[in-house]
Image: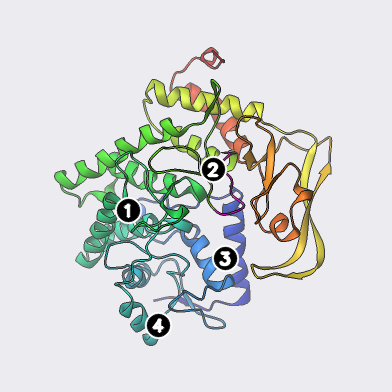
Amino acid sequence: MNLKKNTIANQLLIRSIITLAFFGVLPIRAQQHSINYTKIDVKAFADNANHWYFGFDKKNVINPRPGHPRYEPTALTSIADNILLFQKNNGGWPKNYDVMAILSPEQKDSLIQVKSILNTTYDNGSTYTHITVLANVYTVTKKEKYKTAALKGLEYVLASQYSNGGWPQYYPLEQNYSRYITFNDGNFEGIMTMLKDIYENQPEYAFLDKTYREKLKHAYEKAIPCIIKTQINDAGKPTAWCQQYDEVTLQPAWARKFEPASICNRESADLVLFLMTIDHPGQDVVRAIQDAVLWFQDSKIYNIREKTIPAPKLVTPFRVSTTDKIVVIDSLAPPIWTRYYELVTHKPIFCDRDSKIVYALADISRERRDGYGWYTYAPQKVLNAYPEWLKRCAIRENVLKRD
């Protein structure tokens, strides 16, 4: 068993990985298959690890020690055993722990004592990433406990899906925005990517029997129309998607006080990239992709870039800031997009913790200005991938036009 000290450099690596994942540079979900599965994808758990080490949460059952040691990614069974410890009785997982941390006997006992507390979620890349690892580790080790836990996790995915095909952020459902269907932070695509692997008979899911596989395939097929139905159409003009939707009406909804009901280009880009992975897409999927591509073209912002600058230390109840963000004019800058666009007007918008919508980054408080991703280049990844997708799916370019 290889052990690795979680030095300051190692912690900074975790932080840098999640920063890259946040801005769309790295994938945040595992892509490996058991046929060559030799190490855990650290990136898949980077968001959770980052929050554990750098965002102390008083609700956490255990917390890291200074210089907390971590397993090497090749320590498959040790990490999988951690994943079993973190799994709750309903089959799901809580967020904001590092599954690669080497836990003390006392920490392990603490986790066992709270398995009945069902604070289970898909947020920050939870649950679907854990299931993926367990399926892979079972396939290469044939240890029954990993198969049993993976099946239990898949039952959680089935139980938590709404009849309209969407998933909440938390399940069991809570009386807040977490019950909305969420596309935030790639959660929906993460679940769908896992189900797509099952749908396509990837080797790590060969242990599923026919009945079970059919249930999961049905969950996948039910979710595709949910994506299509929630694409925002403003007065006949199809655009993209909101971060979250009312689970009954499928209308765009507010989440946190600074996350308005709006067209969200960052999350929409991830959704479109997922839809582009579907082989032999139906006309509804093709149209959704092409409408979104048109929207991304229409919503480009030119001649500016976002710049992070040093700033005096600012301590707030939410975070400590030592930088600020400004928008600068740059005629050589590549196109950029804001995270949010206002419904109906399609103006770029920003929002503070008072839920007041404004139209310039400078008009929100420094804590929110510096503490959230207001600009994104994610749609460019879609535009770059679009020509190859047209070619792969044998779709004529001239289909792309407004009616």
**Residue position for label 4:** 107
Residue that lies at the very extreme toward the bottom in this rendered image:
106
Q: Are marks 2 and 3 in contact (CB under 8 Å)?
A: no
- Identify which residue is drawn at 42% across, 26% down: 285
Q: What number is the disc on residue 14?
A: 3
Left or right, 334 with respect to 383, comes to right
- Identify which residue is drawn at 61% across, 57% down: 19
Residue bounds of the magenta highlight: 256-262
For the residue marked with disc 3, what is the amino acid?
Answer: Ile
- Choose the circle earlier in sequence order: 4 or 2: 4
For the residue marked with disc 4, what is the amino acid?
Answer: Gln
- Rendered position, 241 above or below 24: above
For the residue marked with disc 2, what is the amino acid?
Answer: Glu
SS state under label 2? helix
**Residue position for label 1:** 34
- Choose the circle earlier in sequence order: 3 or 4: 3
